[in-house]
Amino acid sequence: MKRQGRPISRHGKHRLVECAKCGKKINSNKLKQHLGTHDPKVDCKFCKKKMQSDELLKHELLCQSKVDETMCDRHSGVHEHMESDECASSVSGLFKTYQLNVKASMDYDEIIVNACESAKAKLVGFVQKHPVKAQIIINISFYKEKLGDRDIMDKTFRSLCEPLLAGDNIDGFLSRAKVYIRARIDEYIRFGSGWLFESFNCAKLDIAKYNPLSVAGEVQLPAKVKKMKSVLNIIAPDNKCFLYCLIAGKLNLRNQLPKHPERYTKYTDQLDTIDMGPVAFPVKMKDITKIEKLNSLSISVFEWNIEENCAIPIKQGSGLGDQIDLLYVEDKDTAHFLLIKDFNKFMNYRTKHHCLMFHCRKCLHGFTSKVSLTYHADRCKQGLNQSIEMPGPGYIEFKAHHKQEKKNFALYFDFECLTLPYHTCENNPDDKCSSTEKYQKHVPCSFSIITTSEFNDYKEESVVFSHEDPGTVTTKFISELDRIYDDMQSCYENNQHPINMTAEDEKNFRKATHCHICKKKLWKKSKTNYPVRDHDHLKKEKSTDCDSALIPL
């Protein structure tokens, strides 16, 4: 019997399995996700970055080979159709699938090796014509014996989807594919609750043309950018606009820009001042970090959004070395870098009030002083979108000390109401004036009152009343409140006791320096903090308080 998809029980639900680490019963399809909660983040052995255990293998393979991890997905970059004898297509036809000739075997290690060798023959021809993105796919069947029944399930394993440019090491890609697919198969067998290798089904190669994000040539600048004097547009015929912007940026920091700074010929004699290292032209976004390290620069890049007519930060500078700001503009065919000579003046396009402002390069928020910007930048770099600052001493003070003391009496009440419809005329739809349409009203039908007190001689009670007439209910409620108030007032007056100060009490009163309620210092000449004698009618305790902390009766 062959079942497609995930294995299910006879009742249509995933089987519960026991976690080997905590003993908790988990659905079999969620066991791998649950095991990840027991594993703390692990350091990459190459860059020491902390990663989850299930993402560590992918990160280390790319980190060791110095492959940009952000480029290794099926959606980054611009893809185009392949023109060849593909057998199928996916992702809106941009990725094409090619069948690989692999001999069937009972050893999946041998299957992986043969699939990579077959893929290499196709990749070499494609990479010589155009950069591509490639991914190797292997489909394998697994079996499991259960209660005399043999379940078979097909499982697909994919390598990392990596970009391959002219001159890239294809053998390195295939080596990473072998390690990654083998590790995923071993992991599935280990955590797959008894699934064993059955047979090899097929191997395929997914491939698409790949145009990495790069900058070269001249673009049609938006009208708002053209008018900005804070932006320098250097037009270069040799795809080196990025290099010329860096040279002009360093000269601008020293106020040494030449006459006619928009001409690239003014910088051709200073090309050696910027070390481009192995980076080729046109420059890709992912290579800017390498140039920063080689030249001790902090390069921030902002993209001009043509639809919203505003700048958006797309790359933050390293913060080390000279700060250079670039504006990235693109159209359908090409893209271009421009130099932002003065970032704060450049950001003035957002307002008609052109007063001096200092802007954050990460969130683009403006401040009226450098001190405020520095204070904000320290928190913005940490991702703190909102900071909490408590007031210092002397700004706010708790003064309602009478609310700290327990009340002598308490009363709780609750109403029950019926929602009845309103019978009114409908609003005139032609009337342009705003109006509120009432369609329901709350009519009281019953209430309940509960009383309690700290005095022992007070008789606590519970009152429940209901009536079909809402007027009778409200009248009865008010009369009950008057009666309960009179009972509480009478009880309170019966429990009033005079302050019988002994000689010891008078001595303690004169020695007191602080109020025992608000803890403030007592001062006889003050209008609010002068000492007064106080006592508790329930505990019969005497104390020295300030006049402002006395509980009002």
Image: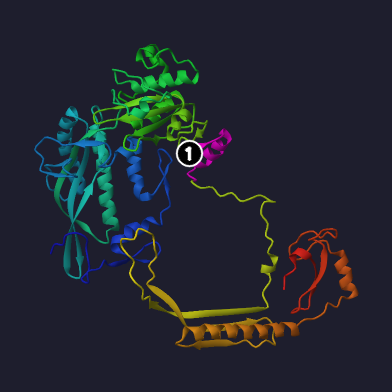
Asked whether 322 or 289 is in front, the reply is 322
Q: Is residue 337 visible?
A: yes
Q: Position of residue 317 (x, y in %)?
A: 44, 32
Asked where in the image residue 316 lies, by quadrant, the reply is top left
Question: Where's the N terminus, which quadrant?
Answer: bottom left
Rendering coords of residue 457 (x, y %):
70, 88
Q: For residue 369: magenta?
A: yes
Q: Is residue 446 visible?
A: no
- The residue lying at 35 percent from left, 35 percent from top is 309
Pick the residue in front: 500 or 147: 500
Q: Position of residue 101 (x, y in %)?
A: 11, 42
> Does 151 appear above or below 199?
below
Nearer to us in this view, 548 or 321: 548
Q: Quadrant of the C terminus?
A: bottom right
Magenta highlight range? 363-384
Query: On the picture, is 241 further left or further right than 415?
Result: left
Q: Badge 1 local density, few (<14 within 10 Å), some, or many (20+)?
A: few
Q: Secondary structure at mark 1?
A: loop
Residue 369 spot, x, y in % from top left:
56, 34
Taking 486 as reference, is 176 left or right? left
Amino acid type, callout 1: His
In the rendered image of this protein, does residue 508 appear above or below residue 238? below
* Corner quadrant of residue 269: top left
Determine which residue is flagged by label 1. Answer: 365
